Amino acid sequence: MHLEKLLKYMRENHPRSVRGIEEARAVSPARFDETAEMFLGWLVGARGEDGILMAADAYVQFSTDVNLAQARYEADGHYANHSFAEVYADHYSQDETMSGYLWGIYLTNFLWAHHTEISFFYRDHFLTKLSHAENLVEIAPGHGGWGAWALSVLPQARLQGFDISPSSIEIAASVSRAAGLGARASYTEKNALSLQEVPAECADGLICSFLVEHLERPQELFAVTRHLLKPRGFAFITGALTAAQVDHIYEYRYESELVKDCEQHGLRVLATLSAGPQRTLPKARFLPRSMALIVQKRINDTF
């Protein structure tokens, strides 16, 4: 099993990371194992057997970088970067840096306990709403795992993905091919905030995972979401709150801020989940959280 290989490697090479994985598995052991095998199977298909070891190292590096960024945030009271231009020059445009970063994030979908909760919420409460969806749009697919998951349970659907990073486009496409879904997924290099150029109301379902905190003006993204969604279509949006990373720009502090941004841009919030890690820095001022929202285009003031 791919999971056994990952766990063995982590115990032997990164033992300090094993406790967090055990916390994630404890959320729901059977479902954790199923989700892990799915993601790891796609990883092996995209990168070969050694891909698990590569991604494990990338995951540990990513988690370490996140912890360091959170410690600096605790000390400074604000995120390190304030402009997209800074982050793009130092991070998104660097193919080698982005590759490790994306594969590290790929594993957090099930190796971080609070992201495991988000993943199960996505499967149970979002994908179940899309049984008749034919056209999906993914904004900033990154590693492509969310979109591949959607296509794997929606055999009639096709997906268009848009990302500003060439590395993301390449990795997302490789994951969809590894999952046997390449014929139903296409990816285009494009800025998320220029998607108003894409035909309106083209998406039965829309996925946008952890992008809002990477933008200087995330409110524009909610307007783009409304533009793309068909009436009665559903969108899955996630965002980070008081959670620092090297490429986080916009600081959301309260769950209500994300809800308000959705509502002010013509979206009705149907369901939310806010999840945080089980362990935080000693005497922390900020609780890093991940929040997921399921939204629908509002038709009028009563819907």
Image (tube, rainbow, N blue to C red):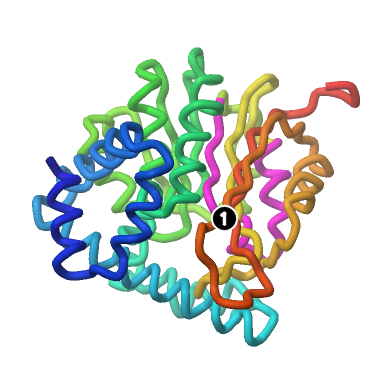
Residue 193 on the magenta span = no
Viewer-nearest residue: 170 or 77: 77
Position of residue 286 measured from the top left corner of the image (x, y, whole percent): 66, 70
User: Few, some or many C-alpha atoms within 10 Å of disc 1 (few <14, some 14-19, many ≥20)?
Assistant: some
Residue 201, quarter of the rendered image: top right
Residue 271: percent from left, percent from top: 67, 32
Q: Pick whichever, 115 or 44, lies toward us.
A: 115
Write the start and end of the magenta stretch as one range: 205-226
Please, is residue 174 above or below residue 12 in the view? above
Above or below for 186 versus 253:
above
Pick the quarter of the image with the C terminus: top right
Quarter of the figure with residue 265: top right
Residue 214: % across, % down: 58, 63
Q: Residue 240 is drawn in which quadrant?
A: bottom right
Q: Which residue matches tag 1?
A: 276
Q: Amino acid at mark 1?
A: Gly
Q: Residue at 44% across / 51% down in the picture?
A: 113
